[in-house]
Image (cartoon, helix red, strand yellow):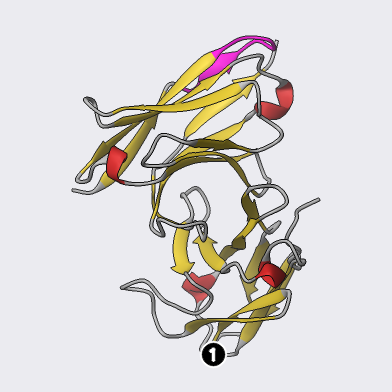
Amino acid sequence: QSVLTQPPSVSGAPGQRVTISCTGSSSNIGAGYDVHWYQQLPGTPPKLLIYGNNNRPSGVPDRFSGSKSGTSASLAITGLQAEDEADYYCQSYDSSLSGVVFGGGTKLTVL
Amino acid sequence: EVQLVESGGGLIQPGGSLRLSCAASGFTVSSNYMTWVRQAPGKGLEWVSLIYRTGSTYYADSVKGRFTISRDNSKNTLYLQMNSLRAEDTAIYYCARDASSDSNWYFDLWGRGTLVTVSS
């Protein structure tokens, strides 16, 4: 049971927009800690996708965007492409645990 | 080239010990917060431990008292000493570099990981 809750899977057709939710609590997202997102392609390490709720590292397409409100955050992917098929994880800090927490991960399938 | 390369994984019996290494190049380990994250086969990411620039250390409850994170500045290498290993510690262990330098930890550089299998 992950501290941050994500849907196990989402899907969309090429060109469509999908969102992935990440729900936390008052000791992590709701306490004001930033949310970060990672993309993990099969057999590879995670790659930083969004940091500080809505910032993209250099090289990440602007099709990827993040938002945060209250105790939740979301990752949006527009103009879905086949290469976006991967697992996506949200991550934050939890003050009760004094450590990093991850969501359980969401598998994105491009139909 | 800026990179992290883990080593030291393998098959170990329950109750045994193993030390993982993470060699950094292109940047200085001691100037950054560094972390270990693991991923059990077919499962999600689980944070394990983090070390500050000051040397302060933090651990997930699941490994506290059994695992120790450390670094060797002269070798620019991060370590994870794992004792009293259990079957549930079986995972790919990734080292990663923190990019935040405050409590909003997030990780911008990851190694390829090393597999630890705990089994008799």
* Residue A58 in which image quadrant: bottom left
From the viewer's side, name the closer residue of A41 and A72.
Answer: A72
Asked if B72 appears above or below B35 in the picture, the reply is above
Residue A35 on image: x %, y %: 58, 68
Residue ranking furthest to the right: A1
Q: Amino acid at mark 1?
A: Gly
Task: Residue at 53%, 24% (x, y): give it.
Answer: B68
Give left or right: position of B99 versus B40.
left
Q: Position of residue A40 (x, y in %)?
A: 52, 58
Q: Main secondary structure of the magenta part?
A: loop
Magenta part of the protein: which range? B9-17
Q: Is residue A39 magenta?
A: no
Q: Residue B116, percent across and down?
A: 56, 25
Residue B67's quadrant in the figure?
A: top right
Q: Is residue A3 above or below residue A109?
A: above
Q: Report the chain holding disc 1.
A: A
Left or right position of A111 against B28: right
- The residue at 53%/83% (across/down) is A80
Q: Is residue A44 above or below residue A10?
A: above
- The residue where tag 1 is placed is A15
Q: Residue A36: where, in percent of width, then height?
A: 54, 66
